Amino acid sequence: MIELKGIKKRWVINYSLVVVIVMVFVEGIFLFLITNYYYNNIEQNLLNEATVITGFFNKYLTSDILGYENNAKEIIEGYSFDEYLEVQALDLEGNIIFNSSGFKRKELVTSQDFVKALTGDIGSWMGEDLNTGEAIMAVSSPIKDKGEKIVGILRFVTSIEGAKYMIGKWFLFSIIIFFIVIIIISILSTVFTTTIINPIKEITDAAKNITRGKLDVKIKKAYNDEIGYLADTINNMASKLSEVQEMKNDFISSISHELRTPLTTIKGWSETILTGDLTDKEETKTGLKIIIKETERLTNMVEELLDFARLESGRISLFFSKINLKKELDETIYIFEGKAKKKGVEIVYTDYKNNIFIEGDKSRIRQVFINILDNGIKFTESGNKIFISIHEESKKVVVEFKDQGIGISKDEIDNIKEKFYKVNPNKEGSGLGLAISNEIIKLHGGQLDIDSKVGEGTKVKITLLKENN
Ligand code: ADP
């Protein structure tokens, strides 16, 4: 016995069973019609004979019972009947007075056809011959004296064994067809379900491997359909996961590297101070200052990391309020003017006539401005400029930072917003700034776009929704 499970089971129930039910139904109707056809034909023949002979009798018969009994034999013998047909002349009790086959019958006829004929109508009946056990059909027709009083019954009997045999053949034929269809359905079902089940098994195995951390799976795409699409999706997911894995590893090595530099400096200066026996006050002071600065750098980095993790997992809530975006930009620029000047970078700010209000988190927005402007100064050589502007565009606010710095190549630009990504891993910074900024702007329903050309500079464009929009 084939075990039916899962999709196969559902398929058999939903499809094969329906086909089987329909087949049984259609074949049932077919057999019913065939049976009716054969029996109706025979009955019609008997009825025709009965009508003709009874008409003949009713026309020429002498008008009493005696006349019927005498005439019956004569007429039946004189008439040439079909050889399969037996004509019986019955009296009103059901005794067979005469029989065309010459076969002596002693039985008393009581069948339905006879009973019906006694009421004056033609009756028909199917049953068994009492003598031979053969299947027969009989039609009985009343003979009426002057069209009124019933004087006798003429009964026409024929064997229906032939018809039964034919019907049996049709039945067998139907059963054979039925089994052929069942076999075809089974083959088709198996073929069809395997084309579904096998790929699903493969996909399941692949998913299990992914769960176990084996990410180099590649599912063969056998069909270009929903299952093929699923295979593609899983393959895609595996490669994405593997990318994330790689990035995580990269991050760990980059963060370790990032942490090692200040730690080395701290350790170095601590040892210097210790071996110097704290006698050189100036050296001790310088050393301690550097230690404090490096510790701050470490703290900042850790803060940034935590910040990003929280932002990305949505565990941080922004405090929205109505803020003056232009004022935030003004103040950020003011703070950075000193630093830019020191490096020889000029900030060119195109002031906007109006205040522009947005619904946002003040300190987070400020954080974004600081990060972008800081990058701008960091990656722009002395003597070059940074252009900053803010303006309204119908329901939106656009803030642009355009520097004449080193620029970012096309390949890098897509990664720049990813966490921990740095074009030059040896430069300072965690590679988190833009990722955090991008996240913050997204949480504000805005957009952060970066456009850059190596050697020409970088443009960072922030688009936010104005208040009450
Ligand atoms: P970081 O904190 O290291 O600056 P960011 O996410 O802010 O991290 O920036 C990621 C990388 O993108 C930087 O390391 C730098 O290589 C590149 N980058 C960012 N801004 C600029 C810019 N204005 N010009 C050139 N390169 C930039």
Image (tube, rainbow, N blue to C red):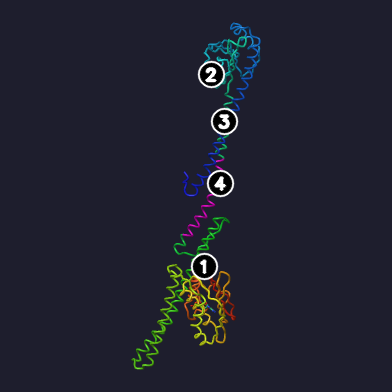
Which residue is under mark 4? 188
Closest to the camera, between mark 3 and mark 1, is: 1
Which residue is under mark 1? 468
- Crowding near the residue tagged with mark 2, few <14, some 14–19, many ≥20 C-alpha atoms within 10 Å: some
Question: Front-most of 215 and 64?
Answer: 64
* Horizontal side of residue 450 vs 310, given as left or right: right
Residue 341, percent across and down? 52, 87
Tell me the magenta residue range.
Answer: 181-207
Residue 185 lies in the magenta stretch? yes
Q: Is residue 412 visible?
A: no
Circle number at residue 32: 3
Whether ligand 1 has any atom under 8 Å from the Cβ at mark 2 is answered as no
Q: Quick one: SS at disc 3?
A: helix
Tell me how far mark 1 sits from mark 2, CA to CA.
95 Å
Tell me how far mark 3 sits from mark 1, CA to CA.
77 Å
- Crowding near the residue tagged with mark 1, few <14, some 14–19, many ≥20 C-alpha atoms within 10 Å: few
Nearest to N terminus: mark 3 or mark 4:
3
- Residue contact between numbered discs 1 and 4, judged by CB atoms under 8 Å: no
Q: Residue at x 34, y 91 (%)?
A: 278
* Horizontal side of residue 45 vs 274, given as left or right: right
Query: Which amino acid, by three-letter code, is at mark 4?
Result: Leu
Relative to 374, residue 3 above or below:
above
Q: Quick one: SS at disc 1?
A: loop
Query: Which amino acid, by three-letter code, is at mark 1?
Result: Asn
